[in-house]
Amino acid sequence: MRIKTDFLIIGSGIAGLSFALKAAEKGTVMLITKSNQDESNTKYAQGGIAAVWHSKDSIEQHVADTINAGAGLCDEKIVRMVVTEGTDRVKELIELGTRFDKNPNGEYDLAKEGGHSENRILHYKDVTGYEIEHALLKQIAAHKNIQVYDHYYSIDIITQHHLGEVVTSQTQGITCFGAYALNTKNGVIDTVLAKITVMATGGAGHVYATTTNPVIATGDGIAMVYRAKGHVKDMEFVQFHPTSLYNPGENPSFLITEAIRGFGGVLKTLDGREFMHKYDSRGSLAPRDIVARAIDNEMKTRGDDYVLLDCRHLDRKGFIEHFPNIYNKCMGLGIDPFVKMIPVIPAQHYLCGGIIVNEYAQSTIDNLYAIGECACTGLHGANRLASNSLLEAVVFAHRAYEHAISVLPEKKIKENIPDWNAEGTEQTEEMILITQSQKEVQQIMSNYVGIVRSELRLKRAFDRLEILFNENERLYDEKVITRKLCELRNLICIGYLVIKHAMRRKESVGLHYMVNYKKKI
Ligand code: FAD
Ligand code: SIN
């Protein structure tokens, strides 16, 4: 099938949905997503969305906290822009039907998370992402200009490469004409031609064995853009959340929001001792990179499998009101947080790097924008400040929209694009070739490219991954395309980029900690 649209949006998380709702006022929108409509990292966001909301707080404070967490590598202009514009974007989410909790005075109940000097996190209990996702999807469903295609998997973006031209990362004027997409319900690969394409594919958590991300997070968008010779950046900065629930066998890992530490929860080792003040004066509420590294260090020196989050001293009623989802999860596992401490362990959570974009979310490929977690805007630097991600997504969705509609009138659909050619390919009979390789990628990345790295470990990871890359490329060329096969291909690409960027950075900074370039843990 050949489909034509003004805007092709790949991904139905907060970034893609926010852009779609705006763009639909100016043109036809095709929004594709590889799983159920609501399946996304967004849906699982717990803590909330950071914004300067009251007079005690200030733009300057939020800017300073973001830059401080980012270990000096943030782009200050972008940080100021996001923080300044963020409050209006959050107000729009409220206008679109998102509920955020209020206190008895009717004011928004602002929570605190690691690295924030002020209470500034708007939240809906501990299920903020679900609330936002569903408020946006309700609006999307009501919009006549938006067609949603679910279980529809984008394989690659279309550029002049598909017209037979040689394209390299140095080629000027690489242009995106849409994407090839696999309808996973019937196995047909469609050609989607668009005037403007928006990558909103989210994170890449499943490149690691342990992650808080749902299974859709396989870095597809970043890999597609990299293959199309677009530029990516900062891939070495992989954020591990300090506190996912220690529950062996559960995958993805269940998050225990940082807001619990903002509410007074304290990290302890198995013998009941606090340890965070050894590492940072902010204790359990230090920025994430510091807390995750401290936990990793305590676990390794003590030989423990996890640490504990002590909530026993907290106000029970307030806790249950604020964190009902976490409370129920713990109780379901026989952990009453007011009797027992919660066992926690770091897990991959967020990718700071991604597709390089400018302040209007334009990638280095013409007609292609990137927004949300798959983009690298310069906001996060070497370590993202908690709850700045949802904020970044809505600010850049708006900026991408403003830019895209200003250029839309001059854009045309490229008609002479060939359809997908599957000639000579055969069905994969041995799924084990894919599933086992995926596990190997995840093991390599977790063991050698985790919270603490070394040159030796990176080299070993690189060499191991190369074998998997070569095997998978053969499989990709010979077999019928499936979502699983493409996801593995993308995960290998993401692993390669993380390692390559990590090898290039000859220092320990933010989330990239190298034993060869020591600094305080
Ligand atoms: P996503 O929400 O991940 O959406 C990506 C979409 O792209 C999905 O619909 C997916 O199916 C689709 N997709 C991917 N590849 C393809 C493909 N090849 N073809 C078609 N569709 C595709 N951030 C905060 O700011 N505050 C928080 O409190 C917070 N809590 C979090 C808790 C958890 C457990 C997790 C995992 C993350 C949390 N984050 C939080 C991070 C934040 O949720 C994400 O960074 C953000 O939601 C990303 O939004 P997005 O729209 O970029 O991507
Ligand atoms: C959390 O709730 O701890 C996650 C917040 C975030 O990732 O920004």
Image: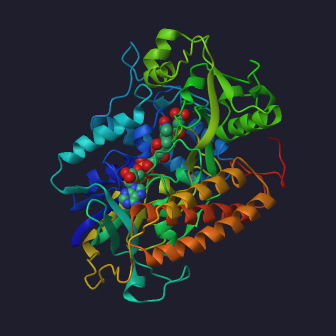
- Looking at the rendered image, the quarter that the C terminus falls into is top right
Give the mark count: 0
How was the colour assigned to the protein in this rendering? rainbow
One can see residue 394 in this view: no
Q: Position of residue 383 (x, y in %)?
A: 63, 47
Quick check: 131 left or right of 282? left
The image quadrant that residue 236 belongs to is bottom right
Question: Eyeballing the image, is 122 above or below 444?
Answer: above
Q: Is residue 77 visible?
A: yes
Instruction: Estimate the x, y position of residue 151 in percent, counting from the top left.
Output: 31, 56
The residue furthest left is 144
Report whether 405 appears left or right of 448.
Answer: left
Residue 480 location (% of width, % of height): 38, 72
Going by the image, does 210 lie left or right of 325?
right
Q: Quadrant of residue 467?
A: bottom right
Residue 42, by quadrant, is top left
Identify whether 369 is placed above or below 446. Answer: below
Question: Nearest the camera: 118 or 290?
Answer: 290
Point out the image quarter for the N terminus: bottom left
Residue at x-position 38% and y-position 38%: 90
Looking at this rendering, what residue extends furthest in the front direction? Answer: 429
The answer to which of 520 and 273 lies nearer the viewer is: 273
User: In this orientation, which residue lies closer to the viewer: 185 or 155?
Assistant: 185
How far across and how far down the image is residue 411, in percent?
28, 75
